[in-house]
Amino acid sequence: MTANSSVVESGEASVRRPSGRHPRSLWTLAFTELWERFSFYGLEGVLGFYLLYSLSEGGLALDAATTVSIVGAYGGAVYLAQILGAWTADRLVSPRRLVLVGAVVITLGHVSLAVVPGTEGLAAGLILIALGTGALKTNITSIVGMLYAEDRDKRDAGFSYFYMAINTGAAVGPLLTGVAQTTWGFHAAFALAAIGMVAGLVQYGLKMGALPAESAVVRNPIDRSGLVRALAVVLGVVLLAALVWGVGLVDSGNLVNVVTGVVFFAAAAYFTVILRSPAVIDLEKRRIRGFVPLWVASTLYYGLLFQQFATIVVFITDRVDLSVGGWEMPASWLGTSSSFAVIAIAPLVASLWVRMGARQPVTAVKYAIGLSIIGVAYLLLLVLQAVHPGHTVPALPLLLVLAVAGASEIFVGPMGLAIATRIAPERFKNQTVALMMLTLAGGSSLSGLLGTLYADIPSAVYFAIVGLVPLLMALCLKLSARRIDALTS
């Protein structure tokens, strides 16, 4: 690679681009992800309120504990499904095509929520969205990693731009679905999320042919007997899930506990398989061992960040005055400040990493910065509720606190995606990204567990705990940063 140019593989040929620019396909993938996140967070922004609100308000009138359990379990299942998506891309269907399939299934899920009332529509919609996101999310991230196979310094910047697109969709989605919900009801909001996903599907379908040639390859195709065994396992899992639900061992109240257990079991199994596989060389195993503390830190971080869809929803319903100058702010708008904060600082942080080049902080230090910021945000929330007791917490200061919490994500999310695609063993490319996505699954289900804790202890104690724990984790990462970097290099 020369100083003035680099070679990027397209679907048909290699094309040259100036070394200071990012591949054109980055923007194709970024805009697809923008629309997918528009639909996902457009739903997520109103989902908790849909479960909590009374029947007369168009909701399902569930209690707070059940609501946070469902929201946490759904989020965990969305990212847990990415194990299946990653395995499918490695063994059955190419990442490029599987992204398209996932987009179609997600669209059907949003349509189900929009047109089928009650718990039936809720169950069908959430299951389809979880499966579709499992097919799309890991594989679109893997394709972004393919664009930077030989450019580590620019990789973090590229993923920061990709993350900016993610958060643009995550911010605009709840804004528009919030307006739709307050104006026409929840099902109109779900329909708007479906429209957003259709836009992403069309955009990706038109541009997918120009993606890297590697994205059209099934890396480790399965034979017929292996496929039969895999289908038998999937069928067995489905039947077991139906059985435990049917006899009442698992219900909406304890679903989050089960999902959390499955997530951590799956993560442990993944690490074990990769570290013991004879197909993984010693250098790759060393990198995976160095990745373990970052995986744990990511899971904790997302457990705290995803509180905005669980505990914070209950907090808004119980404690926040949504009146701003006589205007009633849609409740779902409060969470959008987190995404707008990421959008605002992502270009600045991305350009900073490019300017610093090899002098930029190592990944563990970037994680420590993000954990410190979100810890401070929850301590600010502790102060805010102390100053405003009862149902008097003003909306605007809460917007600022949630923006601080959201800004922290630029130091964790894109860094995790970048390192996962960089250190992934050759035989476990997509599945290592799925392992990174399991931090989102674990974080989402952890947010549900934390939500149940919020209901059982004083809120001041709760916010003190979730504020101080990430600060302690940040200190541990800072002290071990050089060791982690040496292992993952």
Image: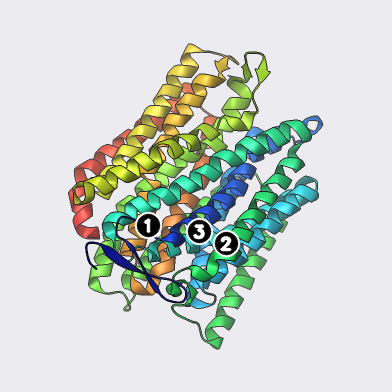
- Numbered label attached to residue 204: 2
The residue tagged 1 is 22
The residues bearing labels 1 and 2 have C-alpha atoms spaced at a distance of 18 Å
The residue tagged 3 is 28
Disc 3 crowd rating (10 Å Cα; few below 14, some 14-19, many 20+) is: many
Mark 2 belongs to which amino acid?
Answer: Tyr
Q: Nearer the viewer, residue 445 or 89?
A: 89
**Residue 191 x/y as whole percent:** 73, 47
Residue 211 versus residue 325 in the image, above or below: below
Q: Nearer the viewer, residue 168 or 229?
A: 168
Q: Nearer the viewer, mark 1 or mark 2?
A: 1
Identity of the residue drawn at 58% across and 52% down: 36
Identity of the residue drawn at 37% across and 53% down: 158
Identity of the residue drawn at 34% across and 66% down: 424
Identity of the residue drawn at 46% across and 55% down: 438
Residue 381 versus residue 225 in the image, above or below: above
Residue 162 versus residue 91 in the image, above or below: above
In the figure, is residue 60 to the left or right of 304? right
In the figure, is residue 218 to the left or right of 43? left
Quadrant, the N terminus: bottom left
Q: Are marks 3 and 2 in contact (CB under 8 Å)?
A: yes
